[in-house]
Every structure is written in C-alpha cells, then in structure tokens.
Image (tube, helix red, strand yellow):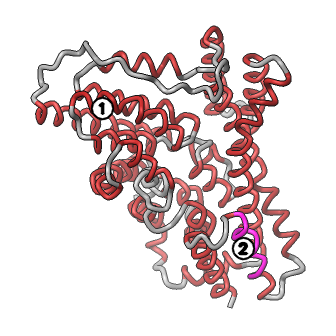
Amino acid sequence: MLALIGVLAILALTAAILSNRASPVAALILIPLAAAIAIGQGAQAPAMMVAGIGKIAPVAAMFVFAILFFGVMTDAGLLDPIVRRILKAVGRRPSRITVGTALLALIIHLDGSGAVCFLVAIPAMRPLYDTLGMDRRILACVASLAAGVNFLPWTGPTVRAASALHIPVLDIFKPMIGVQLAGLAFVFVVSWWLGKREEKRLGLVEAAADGAPTLDIPEHGAEPGLARPGLFWLNLALTLVAMGMLVAGVAPPAVVFMVAFAAALLINYPKVADQRARIDAHARSALLMASVLIAAGAFTGVMGGAGFLKAMADAAVANVHPDSGRHIPFVLSLLAMPLSMVFDPDSFYFGVLPVIAETHARLGGAPVQVAQAALVGQMTAGFPVSPLTPATFLVAGLAGVELSAHQKFAFPFLYGASLVMAVACLLLGLFPL
C-alpha cells in the first residue's frame, strides 16, 4: 500500500508540473501532505517537512548567495573584457568562430544561468554567422553544448540532486571534474569540426583571420553606470579565490559564497543604497529557486519519513536481480539525456531520482553514484533541446532558427556529449564496471 501511494504521489507531482496545473512549489508541498494524510500520518507530516527542510538548508543558502555573487560580478562588468577579447580573436574563420562561440558560452554560463548565457552569447556571435553566411543551427548547437556540459555546484541540476538525496554538493561535483573536462573536450572538438565543415561548404578554407565586422556587444549591467572597469583585476582575483576555496573544500560552499558576495558588494558598491539596489535586482531569481528547494525539502522529508521511498525501493528491489544493481548508475547515465525530453527537472530530481537512489542503496550501491549518473544528461546536456524548458525556445528564437530544426540538429551532439561523460564516469571509476 505504501509503495502504491508513493508511486501515485510521484505521478501526481509529475502530472501537476507538466500540465501547468500547479507550480512546482505548490505541488511539492501539497502532494506529499495529501499522501501522508492518506496513510494516516497527517499529524506527523509537519515534523517530517521541517526535518527535510533542515537537510537542504545549506544547499539553498549556497544557491541564493551564488546567484547574488555572480549577479554583482556581472553588474560590475567582470565578463565584458573577456567577451570583447574572444570576439576580437575569432576573426572571420568559421572554425575559430565556432570554437569562440563555445568558449564565450562556457564563460558566460559560469553564473549557472542558461538564459543569461544564451541572451549574451548568441546575440554577440550571430552577426559573424550572418556576415559569413554560416548555418545558424551551428550557433544554437555550439552554445547549447557549452552550457549543457557546464554543470557546476551552483547550477540547477546539481543543486537539485544534492537537495533531493541530501548529499553535500561537493561530494557529487568534485569526483566529476574529470568527467566534465572530458565533456568539454568533446564540445570543443565538435565545435572545431563544425567550423571546419562550414569553411569547406562556404569555400572559406583560406579565409583571413582578420577583418571581422565590428560587433555590438550586449551590456551586462542591468542599468547604466554599474560597470566597474577599474576593479576588473580585483574582481577577477576575488572570483578565482572563491572558486579555489570552493573546489578545495576550505569552507562549506554556502559560507564561501556568503563571504564572497559580501566582499563583492562592499568593493564594487560601497554606498548602502547601491548595495540594496543590487540585492533587489537579483533577489527574484534567487528567491524563485530557493523556494523550490525548500518545498523540495518538505517533499523528500515526507516521502522518506513516512516510508514511501523505502516501500517503493523494496518493491523495485524485489523485481531486480541483485547482480544487476551495480549497473543502475551506468544505465541511468545512458538514459539521462533523453529523459530530459520526458521529465522536467523538478519532477525528475525530486520525484524519480530518490526512488532510484534508494533502490541502488538497497542493492549495495552508493546514492551519490545515482546523482552523478543523472548529471551527465538530465537537464544538463538535455536542457537546451527539451521542450519542457524555456531555454530551448530562447536558443531557437535568439539564433533565428525553427525549434524543430534546432532540436533535430543539436540532439545528436548533445547526446554524444552525454555518452562521452557516461563513459568517462566508467573509466574514472565513478561507476562500477
């Protein structure tokens, strides 16, 4: 009975979110509460919710202050000189332009926002593609590849995986640094190959590397006068120190970003009124995701505390051969990217992933492997072509291509990146052979 109600709760969560009948926050709060009442544990549900929220609080705090920190850095113009240098270097050779597109998208995506990445990178590079007559599908594809492979500790999928399974975010991310490097190598090789193919198609094999048209680079600052070009090197040093401390595990990620944000705010905007304005400017995006994470803590708290996850895992284990359990992470990694076309990130990471992780744990595996398997494709490499994310429509619209044309062209390359990272997980020992 517990397993059946648990499955119905997950199906209800998925249906409510995908059908737009309820926001993720409302569905994550009300559905587990209804499930707990159905099994007579309604009185215990509030305590379960609070316990679940307590477990994800550090991750939510990290996300909020990471968004604020990168928002301030962007407002201060940290990325502007880098963007201009890349645009100047690519010239008029398609193989350089495509690689430059990937590098630009990768750097812009450091703040963890796919929308910001595409809003900056695609309009900045599109004039070059149009001037030379290059296929705009390549622009959309290369930008999607760079953003999709760039899963960082503060990006949505990583944060969701850590929250859903109550695993420290660095325990998931640090072993995957080599995996991500393999994926990025694939991205740049594919970008270069697509550029070389365009050179041949356009008869530009001997194209000069200079003489590129003058391009209008989108301003990063939300309002005039926010840029602090004189503080570029200090801001860059602060960012590198923060990233180094994060990867080295010197302090908890939430603390690193809290301190880095406070320092960035004081350095770039000493006036209290300006500080408040910068916080207000980025509070909406931080609050939206933080509310989802807190609601997800309530969901997983009830699903675990009431015994739903254990019951569903027991039912799954009864139908899985014990020797097959160790292959669950690798199988999931092969399916993760296509699953982006079926599940939105909230319903997958908060509804489906905990059941898979519990099943894997009951068969002797480590839940962190399931989280890592999901990250090689589920709403990472998969998000720029998934019809369930606004980013897909944004990419196609900014690049000026039909949605179906973008999906057909980019899907094989994005899936290829996901498969490369899945194999890298095997070779690096993250998944058992």
Which label belongs to residue 98?
1
Q: Is residue 32 magenta?
A: yes
Q: Which residue is mark 2?
A: 303
Q: Is residue 241 visible?
A: yes
Task: Using residue 233 as the reference point, say whether residue 405 is left or right of it.
Answer: left
Segment tinted magenta in the rendering: 25-35
Query: Which amino acid, mark 2?
Result: Met
Which amino acid is tagged 1? Thr
Task: Kindly state the secondary structure of the residue where label 2 is placed.
Answer: helix
Give me the C-alpha separation between circle 2 and circle 1. 46 Å
Q: Position of residue 70 (x, y in %)?
A: 64, 31
Our reading of the magenta stretch's main secondary structure is: helix
| 42 relative position to 425: left or right | right
Name the residue located 82 percent from the left edge and 56 percent from the top edge.
54
Q: Is residue 185 left or right of residue 112?
A: left
Q: Nearer the viewer, residue 296 or 72?
A: 72
